[in-house]
Image (spheres, rainbow, N blue to C red):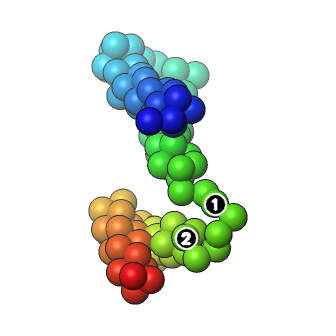
């Protein structure tokens, strides 16, 4: 296994754990409404998604456009379904199906 890939995976895992553990450890039920901590914690969801996306896509990035096509179609499907339905579940499933179908079609 490549050391760079392992480092990215460990950093992504640590960040994901921190994003999930921080609200529990901060005892969000005692926070002032609209305070800086509440705003910070509400931004951790999108930040966690962005972190996982970057960690997942980095190994797939290549100058070979044919090998990059499944990543592009999956990402576009996620974005399109999210904009259309505002559903994380449908966007995730649609992206996975688009990615899988593209891999299958490419052989």
Position of residue 12 in the picture relative to residue 28 (left or right): right
Which residue is disc 2 drawn over? 67
Q: Is residue 44 visible?
A: no
Q: Given contact means CB atoms under 8 Å apart, are the residues at marks 1 and 2 in contact?
A: yes
Residue 103 — which label? none
Residue, x 57% and y 49% (percent of image)? 58
Secondary structure beneath disc 2? helix
Horizontally, residue 46 falls left or right of residue 31, namely: right
| Residue 23 image position (x, y, % from top left) | 37, 23
Mark 1 or 2 closer to N-term?
1
- Name the foreground residue: 100 vs 28: 100
- Few, some or many residues within 10 Å of mark 2 (<14, 14–19, 20+): some
Q: For the C terminus, give its image quadrant.
A: bottom left
**Mark 1 secondary-structure assignment:** loop
Report how far apart the C-alphas of labels 1 and 2 lie in the structure.
7 Å
Label 1: which residue?
62
Position of residue 97 relative to residue 16, above or below, is below
Asked if residue 11 shows in the view, the reply is yes
In the rendered image, which quarter contains the N terminus?
A: top left
x and y, in percent, of residue 67 in the image:
55, 70
């Amino acid at each position: 296994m490549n050391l760079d890939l392992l480092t990215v995976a460990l950093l992504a895992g640590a960040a994901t754990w921190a994003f999930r553990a921080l609200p529990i450890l901060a005892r969000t039920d005692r926070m002032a409404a609209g305070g800086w901590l509440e705003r910070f914690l509400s931004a951790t969801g999108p930040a966690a998604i962005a972190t996982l996306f970057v960690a997942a896509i980095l190994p797939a990035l290549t100058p070979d456009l044919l090998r990059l096509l499944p990543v592009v179609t999956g990402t576009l499907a996620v974005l399109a379904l999210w904009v259309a339905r505002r559903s994380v579940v449908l966007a995730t499933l649609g992206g996975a199906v688009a990615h899988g179908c593209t891999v299958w079609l490419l052989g």
